[in-house]
Image (spheres, grey):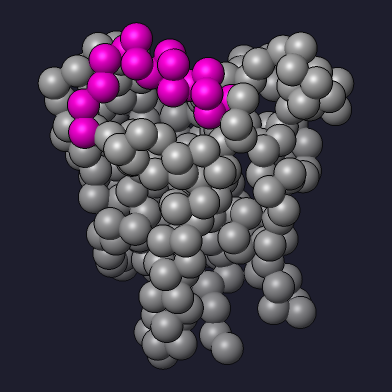
């Protein structure tokens, strides 16, 4: 089956809710925009992705984007695209797929409620914990399976590009990789979120299978043992500046 040579997953840029969680009190999650810094991150990511795509291709680049319809991911996509256009990319297409959206956390939630949810989710387990009025990681996993079915149907089209870029959210990206590589729940629970506009690269090997070329941030074995023993709680975002990059 024909498939893209390269698949790239990228998280949206810094959003206003990333720096001010009080926005969740009266702003729907899907309407939260990027900060100015987030827009800058996305433009820089466009140039970085352009370099990534040119590693093995000297000529013109063709790209199929799949994006979450949330405002912050749309804005990330637009800023990435503007940078890539400036560098000469003209052959691209985009498909907005609601199944690539962020995990649903309910309609509105006060930051104090988020603290309770975060604590319960850490104790229960991110994959199976269903947020009150929202989704569990397992729910997101299920809808991503449907999104991947659509992608695989697209792959067989004669004109499908060699490069595919998914613009989505931290948890969604981790679950996408879990589904793609058939990782266990335990492997997923060790993964930390990518930073804003951090990307992961999957390259197709000669045997047709994909290899994750980017090392992922994970909890250390010691941190995992402490977490499981209840001595140290994790964090909902699972992003740290002192992260250790490992291949799960």
Q: Is residue 80 left or right of residue 140?
A: left
Q: Is residue 120 one of those drawn in magenta?
A: yes
Task: Decide if residue 168 is in sight here.
Answer: yes
Q: Nearer the viewer, residue 150 or 91?
A: 150
State which quarter of the image contains the N terminus.
Answer: bottom right
Question: How many circles with numbers are drawn on the protein?
Answer: 0
Q: Is residue 84 one of those drawn in magenta?
A: no
User: Which residue corresponds to the image point at 15% horizontal and 25% vertical from the top-left?
Assistant: 27
The magenta span reads: 107-122
User: Which residue corresponds to the image point at 53% horizontal and 28% vertical from the top-left?
Assistant: 121
Q: Which of the 4 image quadrants contains residue 147?
A: bottom left
State which quarter of the image contains the C terminus.
Answer: top right
Q: Is residue 50 left or right of residue 22?
A: right
User: Which residue corresponds to the image point at 38% horizontal and 18% vertical from the top-left?
Assistant: 114
Q: Nearer the viewer, residue 62 or 181?
A: 181
The answer to whether residue 138 is above or below residue 204 is above
Q: Position of residue 145 (x, y in %)?
A: 48, 66
Q: Nearer the viewer, residue 13 or 108?
A: 108
The answer to whether residue 68 is above or below residue 158 is above
Q: Is residue 74 left or right of residue 237?
A: left
Residue furthest toward the left?
Answer: 26
User: Which residue corresponds to the image point at 57% horizontal and 19% vertical from the top-left?
Assistant: 235
The answer to whether residue 142 is above or below residue 222 is below
The answer to whether residue 138 is above or below residue 122 is below
Q: Position of residue 119 (x, y in %)?
A: 53, 18
């Amino acid at each position: 089956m024909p498939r893209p040579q390269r698949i790239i997953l990228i998280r949206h840029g810094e959003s206003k809710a990333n720096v001010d969680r009080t926005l969740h009190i009266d702003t729907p999650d899907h309407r939260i925009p990027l900060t100015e810094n987030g827009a800058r991150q996305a433009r820089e990511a466009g140039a970085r992705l352009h370099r990534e795509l040119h590693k093995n291709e000297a000529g013109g680049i063709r790209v199929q984007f799949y994006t979450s319809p949330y405002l912050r991911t749309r804005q990330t996509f637009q800023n990435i695209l503007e940078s890539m256009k400036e560098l000469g990319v003209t052959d691209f297409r985009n498909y907005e797929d609601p199944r690539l959206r962020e995990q649903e956390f309910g309609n509105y939630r006060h930051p104090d409620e988020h603290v309770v949810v975060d604590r319960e989710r850490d104790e229960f387990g991110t994959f199976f914990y269903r947020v009150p009025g929202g989704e569990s990681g397992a729910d997101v996993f299920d809808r991503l399976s449907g999104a991947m079915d659509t992608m695989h149907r697209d792959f067989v089209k004669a004109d499908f590009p060699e490069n595919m870029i998914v613009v989505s959210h931290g948890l969604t990206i981790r679950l996408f990789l879990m589904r793609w590589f058939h990782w266990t729940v335990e492997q997923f629970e060790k993964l930390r979120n990518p930073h804003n506009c951090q990307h992961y690269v999957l390259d197709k090997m000669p045997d047709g299978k994909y290899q994750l070329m980017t090392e992922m941030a994970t909890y250390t074995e010691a941190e995992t043992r402490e977490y499981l023993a209840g001595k140290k709680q994790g964090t909902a975002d699972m992003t740290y500046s002192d992260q250790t990059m490992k291949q799960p």
